[in-house]
Image (cartoon, rainbow, N blue to C red):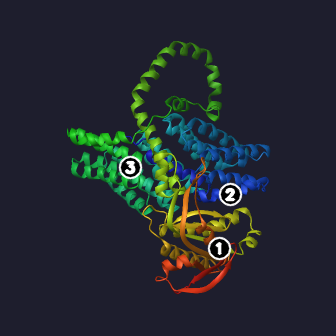
Amino acid sequence: MYIENKVCYLLIGLFYLFSYSTYGQDQKVADSLLKIYQSEKLKGVEKLELLRNLSFNEVNDLEFSIQIANELITLSKEKNNYVYLYRGYSQKGNTHRLVGNLNVALGAFFKSGEAAVKAKHIEGEGTAYIAIADIYSELKNSENAEIYYNKGIQILRKTNNSVLLASALLNAGDEAFNTKNFQAALSYFEESGILFKNADYLTGTAYNKGNIGMVYAEQGKDALAESNINEAIEILEGQEDYYPISVYLTYMSDIYSRKKDFTTALAYLHRSLDLAKQYGLKDQISEANLKLSEFHEQRDNHATAYPFYKEHIVYRDSVINLKSVQEAADMRTDFEVAQEKAIALEKRKTQRIILWSTLGVLFLLGILAYNLFKKNKFVRKTNKIIAAEKDRSDKLLLNILPEETAQELKDKGRVEAKKFPSVTVLFSDFKGFTSYAENLSPEKLVETIDHYFSKFDLIMEKYGLEKIKTIGDAYMAVGGLSYDNVDQAKDMVLAAKEMNDFVNHAKIDDVTTAEFDIRIGINTGPVVAGVVGTKKFAYDIWGDTVNIASRMESNSEPGRINISEDTYKVIKNDFDCEYRGELAVKNRGNLKMYFINNNS
């Protein structure tokens, strides 16, 4: 069974994460950094760092990420800052790789390596070589992949980043596995396993165990294979990392098929398919269906095999431009490989002209035959990449829009504005935030506000509510935007109480130095909801209900939840409410207001 770098792709992502930072990408951070970027206040190294972080964290708009990376490259060249030039090219390469522009990504990684050498940035140089090797591995150019894995590993051994080295060794081992060099693969995995264990990095340990198990499976050492793969699955289930589990389960099926235990083998294949469906792993759904089809076909169960093969076909998408990928696969580096071979090539130039003239036609015929032979396998692989990207786009859309709205946008290409007769709107802001923010660096300011808003997002998700937007230190959310018109006023009050409790607790934790109080206002009533914009979608709500909710917040007190009369009528039997009387509200006259008491 040929794994086609499936688990390697996961480790490539792991490798990029550790080569950049100890934190993952975060679109909320990108949105905050964008405001700083648009203010055009930062200069020098601070602006370079801003561009670097903005490009890295931008996941919704990859074209914008590439634009920022190019701006970072241009500015780094102007200032002769080779460290940030390396980072700019690395980010450009990573983003182009995500969108499938492998030839462009390869060129960017070569330039990142050159910049790292000029900056005497040893870790960056090693990272660039491994990134180049990873691209060649994806393109099935094993010769170049092996050259750059060796170069990168040799450089990374001079650094103190053991997890980065372990990830590089694991990817190199996976490439050796794909070329059937099992002894070399086990050697790489043995060393990377020790490094991951010493670093107490469970995800790396799990991939390492799983890959060792696959090598043993290929060698027919089923007991060792089963033991290692089961260890990997156990760790990954604890980490909730289901994609590699689905891959490893197919290997378990192969092991039991060799034992003639076809019942257990079939059970593993069904488990792999069920797991892939449960977590929306579309490329693995396709692969698992294909394996089930082949399993039944080998046992002459053609009627049973056909539905699985048909389901496999459903998940295949259009083929990407084969010519472009083939050109990238045949690219030869003008970097060190060309330099090392330059003298020898020159000496043999005359002889090779004659040789290639004679063999040219045969070579072209060979390429044609090879492409015809490999076409089916290559089409399957590229379709898996496209399916994964489509799934990723669907998940990103759900980060922007409510589920029903996102589905309507995909089905119709547009979203019609809809009136909801009764929703509950929440506004909050922090007391003293402006004076506190004036004394902070942009990075620390973003870190502080993200600490609060990330928790608020989790609270809203817990109660099935929708965050609408943030403006500075203000946070807006709504409940009741569902087509069954269920009022969520009680859920919103519970969420508001949790927000207030979290802000109070944050005063004594060690995460930030902030000691804010929060004002919260809530109102219930009708709104109109819809999507604005054509490129960067923004979901928003409008109506007098929203304005009154904002007034409830501005008329609240620090540490208190202030609700309107309309909200009070809905939740009065569920919470202890304190009547405040009729208070004057700007542009609204006198409105009745109530505090939610903390003991309710």
Q: Nearer the viewer, residue 397 or 25?
A: 397
Disc 3 residue crowd, few under 14, some 14–19, many 20+, Cα 10 Å: many
- Characterize the local packing of mark 2: few (<14), some (14-19) or many (20 or more) Cα atoms within 10 angstroms: many
- Looking at the rendered image, the quarter that the N terminus falls into is top left
- Mark 1, other Cα within 10 Å: few <14 / some 14–19 / many ≥20: many
Q: Position of residue 482 (x, y in %)?
A: 46, 62
What x and y, as percent, mark residue 294?
28, 40
User: Mark 1 to mark 3: distance in Å?
Assistant: 54 Å
The answer to whether residue 177 is left or right of residue 102 is left
Task: Give the mark nearer the N terminus: 2 vs 1.
Answer: 2
**At which x and y percent is residue 282?**
41, 47
Amino acid type, mark 2: Leu
Residue at x 60%, y 39% (from the top left corner): 105
Query: Residue drawn at (65%, 68%), measured in percent from left and top?
Result: 474
Give the answer, above or below, for where 365 lies relative to 33: above
Depth check, mark 2 against mark 3: the one in front is: 2
Q: Nearer the viewer, residue 392 or 480?
A: 480
User: Which element is circle 3 on?
Assistant: helix
Residue 28 visible to the viewer: yes
Which residue is label 3 attached to?
A: 247
Percent position of residue 504, x then y: 61, 80
Disc 1 or disc 3, which is closer to the eye?
1
Q: Which mark is residue 551?
A: 1
Kind of residue at badge 1: Arg
- Tag 1, which secondary structure? helix
What is the number of the mark on residue 33?
2
As drawn, the label of residue 285 is: none
In the displayed structure, would residue 471 be above or below residue 319?
below
- Front disc: 2 or 1: 1
Q: Earlier in the sequence, mark 2 or mark 3?
A: 2
